[in-house]
Amino acid sequence: MAETGLLAGEEIDMSEQRSYPRQVKTDAGDIEIRLMSPADEAAVLVFGKGLPTHDLLFLPRNISEPKVLSAWVKEIERGAITSLLAVKDGKVVGCGTLVRDPHSWSPHVGEIRMVVSLDVRGKGVGRALSQETFALALGAGLEKLSVQMTVDQQAAIALFESLGFKAEALLRDHVRDVDGKTHDIVVLGHNIAQVQAQMEAYGLPGAVQH
C-alpha cells in the first residue's frame, strides 16, 4: 500500500519523491512552492524585512538580518535544513523550513519553522506551505515534529492544531523583543509514529491523520 498522509482533509501521496516547483491554488491566487536555493537570498531578505518584528520572535534568529540569511543559505547547502518558499507573482510571500539533526540524540525528530506575509494570511497560503513541509518530514521518515511560536499568535497555533499538533510545553519569558519585552513561547508537537500505530490498529497502515 502506498504511504499517504491525510492532512487537513487532503491526501498527500508519499509513495514517490516530492518534486518542486509545484503550483497550488489559494484564496490569494496561484502560488508556486519551490525549494529555496542560494539564488533566493536577496528575495528572502526582502521578505524578512517586510515581516512584523513580532512574527520573527518564534524563529531562532532574525531572518531580516543579511548575516543570518547568509548562514541560512550555508545550512541549506550542506543539507542541514530544507526550506520551501511560497512565491506569488515573483515575490516571496511565505517560507516553511524543516530542521533535523541526524547526528543528535533526536535523529527521529524534526522542527518546522514557518512564516507568511501579512497580505496573504488567512487565504490558505500558510496551510499549503505547512502541508508541503509536513510532507517533506514524512518523506524523510521522521517520527515526531515540533513547532514553536509566541502564545498570542492564535491563528498560527490554530493552523497547526488543525494539522494534528498538540501543545506540549510553555516556555515563559523565552524570547526578548527589540524593546526589551519578554514573551512566552508555546511548543506544539505531532507524534507521527504514534498516530501511524493507531491507524494501523484500525486497519489503515501507512496513514497519518489528525
Image: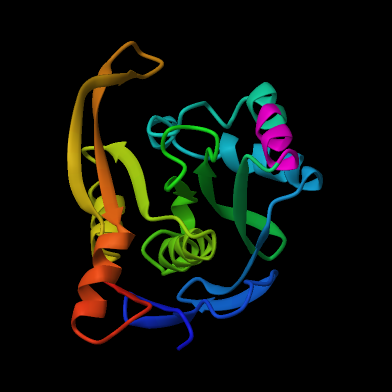
Counting labels gives: 0
Q: Residue at x 60, y 56 (%)?
A: 84
Colour scheme of the picture: rainbow
Residue 36 location (% of width, % of height): 69, 51
Q: Is residue 106 visible from the viewing direction of this image?
A: yes
Residue 174 occupies quadrant: top left
* 59 lies above or below 8: above
The magenta stretch spans which residues?
71-78
Relative horizontal placement of residue 40, taking residue 118 as reference (left or right): right
Relative horizontal placement of residue 116, taking residue 170 as reference (left or right): right
Q: Quadrant location of the C terminus? A: bottom left
Residue 41 location (% of width, % of height): 74, 40
Residue 168 location (% of width, % of height): 19, 42
Q: Quadrant location of the N terminus? A: bottom left
**Depth check, front residue: 2 or 6:** 2
Q: Main secondary structure of the magenta part?
A: helix
Q: Which residue is drawn at 62% across and 25% down?
A: 65
Q: Residue at x 62, y 71 (%)?
A: 18
76 falls in the magenta region? yes
Residue 122 occupies quadrant: bottom left
126 falls in the magenta region? no
Give the residue at the far right of this rendering. 39
Q: Is residue 210 visible from the viewing direction of this image?
A: no
* 86 lies above or below 50: below
Residue 46 location (% of width, % of height): 66, 40
Residue 6 occupies quadrant: bottom left
**Depth check, front residue: 143 or 93:** 143
Q: Residue at x 26, y 39 (%)?
A: 187
